[in-house]
Amino acid sequence: MFTNVLVFFRYNNSMSLWLALAVVGQLINAIVALFDKYIVTSETVVFRPFVYAFYVSVLSSGAILIYFFSWLPIPIEGLSMPSFANVSPLDLIVFSFSILAGYTFFSALMSFFDALRLSDASDVVPVTGGLTAFFTLLFSYMFLATPLPREFMGGFLLLMVGTILISQFRFSWQVMLSATHASLMFGLHYVVFKSFVELTNFDNAFLWTRLGIVFVALSMLLIPEYWHKITARTSRAKGRDGLLVVGNKVLAGFGSIIILKAIEFGDVALVQALGGLQYLFLLIISVIFGSKLNRDFGENLTTQDMIHKAIAIPLIAFGFFLLFI
């Protein structure tokens, strides 16, 4: 029996790798989402959705630093540090992919932060995750020509429906529109990135898409209205605000590169479907630290909340089971 288990894990090594990466990445994203909610709603922090999206996007340039450590080995088979040696020169195709990835990511961030500002993180995150999975699947069929195996569809749909049900449908139209727009843009962003990886390689796609995000964000400074918003909020910011944003962005950067690596090794639609795991992690964090979390984090554990969660969690768990067992 032990020998059979070893053979099974060797045979499924590639799937186990991207699955593990996706789960770890979603745990990090759940923690990041809580701090995102705090930053865009707290009265003690001056940043709001557009300005916060601007700084988060600009700070994406920090991910490039990882390329200077390409000589460091990673003790996990199949993984390696990104290297400048695998980066191609800028041309029209690379520029087009970079700008499209940058625009979709920046636009998604603005809508996502706006939804977080108006509703609870435990509602916005699962809805955005479920809809992002839907749009990613749709765009994968349209642009990547990689239809999912039939046996995966049931689990995928359960996982997506579970994440949507968890919202309790308490959204206003403004929140629903913001969450839907964010999901559409996130889905398009990840499919663009996957296409870029397949056209070139991960190291090339990751560097140029990060630069594309920074370029799109900095271009906002050319618009007087946006220039005023950014400078006005920045002038009121305190050192603690900056440290909070930078620290959360560093954490988000780790989560992002882990998710993108999972996309490289696995199917982009399934990786995004696992966005529903963010809710499970948010729930665990809320149960453990519920009495200590500030209300600014937007986590509620009333009886009604728990009933809704008790219905949705089995859907997510069973969907996960069908997909990967």
Image (cartoon, grey):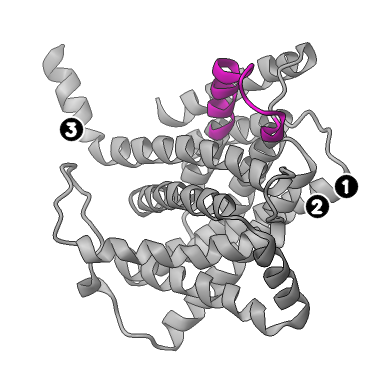
Q: Residue at x 50, y 28 (%)?
A: 320
* Magenta-colored span: 278-298
Residue position marked by numbered label 2 in the rendering: 177
Q: Please rate how many residues cluster around mark 1, counting C-alpha atoms within 10 Å: few if below 14, some from 14 to 19, many from 20.
A: few
Q: What amino acid type is highlighted by mark number 3?
A: Arg
Residue position marked by numbered label 1 in the rendering: 173
Q: Is residue 147 visible?
A: no
- Magenta: predominant secondary structure element? helix
Any mark on residue 16, and which? none
Where residue 205 appears, as percent x and y from the top left, is 38, 68
Residue 125, picture quadrant:
top right
Query: Earlier along the polypeptide chain: callout 1 or callout 3?
Result: 3
Q: Please rate how many residues cluster around mark 3, counting C-alpha atoms within 10 Å: few if below 14, some from 14 to 19, many from 20.
A: few
Q: Residue at x 42, y 80 (%)?
A: 94
Residue position marked by numbered label 3 in the rendering: 10
**As drawn, is 193 to the left or to the right of 120?**
left
Label 1 to label 3: alpha-carbon separation:
49 Å
Indicate whether 240 appears above or below 57. Answer: above
